[in-house]
Amino acid sequence: GNVFGEDKITRRALLQLYGKPAFHLELAERMGAINANARIRGEFNDTVADASYFFFRYHGSTGFGPGAVRKTNYPVYSMIDVLEGKIGSKELKDKVLLVGSMSKNDSADFAFTPYSKRAFMNPKLVVHANILDSIIHQNGVLRAPTWMNWITTFLVSMFVIWSVFTYTPLYGVFNTITLALGFLLVGQVLFSIRGLWIREAQPLIGIFLAYY
């Protein structure tokens, strides 16, 4: 599924099932936004389910409604206003329109996102917009390969060991803390700017185990 059991937050989306494209992928292909059979950035396969998924990026806050501290950047129009001609054609020209409910009548129309886990705050329609946006612009989250994680763990651990045997204990502590904080900062910057997901737990454990 698209939801992680640990925190119920939606972070990934279905691309294909049994060799057939899912809604977002098929829509992007039919619009000509991507080439047919193009591999989406961050796509990975689940052989058990015979499906492929990808971790999509949120392109801003997902909140909607009076109680939302930060609201979605996607324009939202009332379907009644569109039908009555209150929304000009200029606002809708060359735009992808997703039609759905954003009223707080059914909890099934809302989801938890990294921006908020409040009930009736993040419409699934906004989540669908972010999924489609990630597919069209090919900016899904790319997970760093396992070998890179092991190499990173080895390098940071060796640096800590070298630092401990080279400098005084005070400098050793300082270098260890600086390395850990620097690694966290680099990981966050790469994720935010480049959409590169580096698993940070293993290298951080390696840093502190190498010190002790």
Image: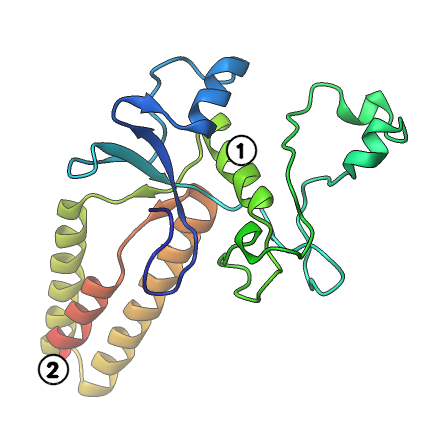
Residue 133 is tagged as 1
Q: Cα distance, mark 2 to mark 1?
A: 46 Å
Task: Give how far across and how far down residue 143 sits, in percent.
Answer: 29, 44
Q: Residue at x 64, y 25 (%)?
A: 96
Three-letter amino acid code at the position of disc 1: Asp
Q: Report the mark closest to the observer, 2 or 1.
A: 1
Q: Earlier in the sequence, mark 2 or mark 1?
A: 1
Q: Is residue 94 above or below residue 141?
A: above
Secondary structure of residue under mark 2: loop
Q: Residue at x 46, y 16 (%)?
A: 29
Instruction: Name which quarter of the figure residue 94 lies in.
Output: top right
Q: Mark 2, residues whose alpha carbon is within 10 Å: few (<14), some, or many (≥20)? A: few
Task: Give how far across and how far down residue 193 sits, in percent.
Answer: 47, 45
**Can residue 155 be seen?**
yes
Instruction: Name which quarter of the figure residue 81 lies in.
Output: top right
Apparent side of residue 21 relative to residue 93 in the rendered image (left or right): left
Secondary structure of residue under mark 1: helix
Q: Is residue 162 above or below residue 113?
A: below
Q: Mark 1, residues whose alpha carbon is within 10 Å: few (<14), some, or many (≥20)? A: many
Instruction: Name which quarter of the figure residue 121 lies in.
Output: bottom right
Task: Give how far across and how far down residue 35 sits, in percent.
Answer: 42, 13
Residue position for label 2? 212
Three-letter amino acid code at the position of disc 2: Tyr
Task: Give how far across and how far down residue 74 sits, in percent.
Answer: 67, 41
Label count reads 2
Residue 147 is tagged as none
Q: Residue at x 18, y 63 (%)?
A: 202
**Can residue 166 be seen?**
no
Query: In which quadrant will I find the C terminus?
Result: bottom left
Apparent side of residue 188 relative to residue 5 in the rendered image (left or right): right
